[in-house]
Image (tube, rainbow, N blue to C red):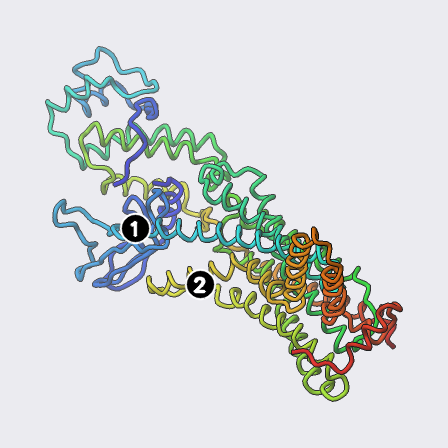
Amino acid sequence: MGSFRPRSEHNCTLAKPTKNEGRGAYNAKFPCLANHLDHPPRWRRGFPPRAIVEACQSVSVMACGGTYEYAIEEFCLGKFRLDMEELDQHHWCSWEDTVEPYGELTNCTYLIALKMDCFWPNRQVDEFFIRIHKHYFHDCSLSGRQLRDPPNHILGPFIVVPILVTLLMTALVVWRSKRSEGIV
Amino acid sequence: PDFESSFVCCVWLCVSGGAGLYCNRTWDGWLCWDDTPAGTVTWQNCPNYFPDFDSTEKATKICSESGQWFRHPDTNRTWSNYTLCNFHTTGKLKMAYILYYMAIVGHALSIASLLISLAIFFYFRNLSCQRITLHKNLFVSYVLNSALTLIYLIAVVNNPDVVGRNPVGCKVLHFFHMYMLGCNYFWMLCEGIYLHTLIVVAVFAEEQHLHWYYLLGWGFPLVPASIHAVARKKYFDDNCWMSVETHLLYVVHGPIMAALLVNLFFLLNIVRVLVTKLRDTHRAESNMYMKAVRATLILVPLLGIQFVIFPWRPENRLAGEVYDYIMHILMHYQGLLVATIFCFFNGEVQAALKRQWIQYKAQWGQRRRDHCSMRSTSYTATSITEVPAFMYHHDCNSEHLNGRHTSEDSELVALKTGETYA
């Protein structure tokens, strides 16, 4: 695997909790984290403090399957969802507009994998992204931004017209040089 | 790795697949791999994410018999083979540098030889005639082309950060490079048209007006170069327009090839006329012009062959290297070739130079003997300078033969008739 961008906890923004989530639900899913906190964590930029996560790692057996999958859906998807909702649906296929939330999402999954000591990328990340793509990007065109030649009906005239003009110009010069001789 | 690639790949991953036993399409972190039938090895070009990855090399991925992607035995994870991407890189880099320096040397030699030829043509004023004027313009266009190419090679090609910054200046430089390339070949075409008009159409008659030739040689190449710039900006706007992977280059190369073909046609027509029709009536002039045409006839295919073999680079490594060397010699040593064939191998130029050398030797000898003041020596010296004055007219001055000529030339013409030139 090539090297990813350098680790930076500030890049990963946490998802906002949905309305139904309360402290209870949160504690049930992450008992280790809940034990260290007096109140539900304020959702702010940045990851839960490193010390807490590392302490949790030593306590529980981290499953890189289900728990990881739940973690990325919990922490990363919400923010991405909000960002995409802010963006008009028509702009979802525009790479320039979606690159930032998409990058943050990818970064977030990577950081969680790092924290949970899972290999990245993995099957859960792949399936996660496939679900996201099926929801947001299913009708985008596949052309990509790779530079390619224009279609033939544009390329053709661009090539043929200068050749014809060249031949015309040559004929003109031959005719004019003949005439300047004064030869009938 | 590029987010864009993963984005594009994943969009495509969602489209449903086909039937039969196959490995599912997947993203391995660097590249997207298509559905592959079980038991086959699929390949695609290496990505260009890393500086030492050669995007002309191939990355491979094995799909096993059971419809699963190959897993590396050490880590038991799916694994794609990218080892070839940077395997040959050091060797190729070395060769690229060799070719780069060859190109620079070629253009420098071309500029030097062309400037010497221009100096010869300007110094020996009696060599001057319309054909030599066309030669001078051709040489000037070659000098400018070589100079621009040198600037382009040194400032842009060898400088990845300039290419990365992508300033407007490097695209302007590329535009002028395309323009000068066009000028080279269109001046060759002008030479061909001039000879054709002189021999086939007008049969050694009076002087032509050169305005149309100037227009075709200097003015017209702006047209393909501008069209190429517009098309490139609109459809294939890569950094500094450096890529040669686009068919838009044919916007410039197409007219050049057309000019070369037309030129070849004119020259063959001239040869036909000289050999068949004029052989009996104007034997002396026919021989003369045969020599003039011979030079152009050798040069046109040599200049043109690089466009013919350009698209076909051999796959084999050794053959590919030989191809690269040949192409580089054909492309970058053209100025030297043109100067040699049109100037240094020109009989009249050689005669003029020889005469000048003899004159200098005689003058130097005279200066040594002058203190004895022997008049006979000075007489001999002047007669040597006077007598061969007609010799270097014979290439260009058929117009002197048939049309008007000044009174002092009349006895020179009398001296000339009946001579056959070797």
Q: Say left or right for B223 vs B49.
A: right
Q: Nearer the viewer, residue A28 or B13?
A: B13
User: Could you tell me which residue is drawn at 34 percent across and 20 percent down?
Assistant: A45
Tell which circle, 1 or 2, labels the residue nearer the N-terminal end.
1
Could you tell me which chain the residue with mark 1 belongs to? B
Rendering coords of residue B291 (x, y %)? 65, 75
What percent of the width, then of the height, locates residue A184?
Answer: 87, 77
> Looking at the picture, how far across and down is residue A145, in whole percent?
46, 46
- Whether residue A10 is visible to the viewer of this picture, yes or no, is yes
Crowding around mark 1 (Cα neighbors within 10 Å: few <14, some 14 to 19, many 20+) is many
Q: Which residue is drawn at 77% across and 70% down?
A: B397
Classify residue B351 as left or right of residue B77.
right
Extreme-front residue of the structure: B372
Q: Which mark is residue B85?
A: 1
Residue B392: which quarter of the image?
bottom right
Vertical placement of A68 versus B206: above or below? Answer: above
Which quadrant does the N terminus of chain B fall into?
A: top left
Q: How far separated are the C-alphas under marks 1 and 2?
A: 26 Å
Indicate whether B155 appears above or below A47. below
Q: Quadrant of the C terminus of chain B?
A: bottom right
Q: In this view, does B94 lie above or below B322?
A: above
Label drawn at residue B326: 2
Q: Which label lies toward us, 1 or 2?
A: 2
To the question of a shared chain for discs 1 and 2, the answer is yes
Instruction: Residue B352 in the image: state x and y as whole percent.
Output: 68, 63
Residue type at tag 2: Ile
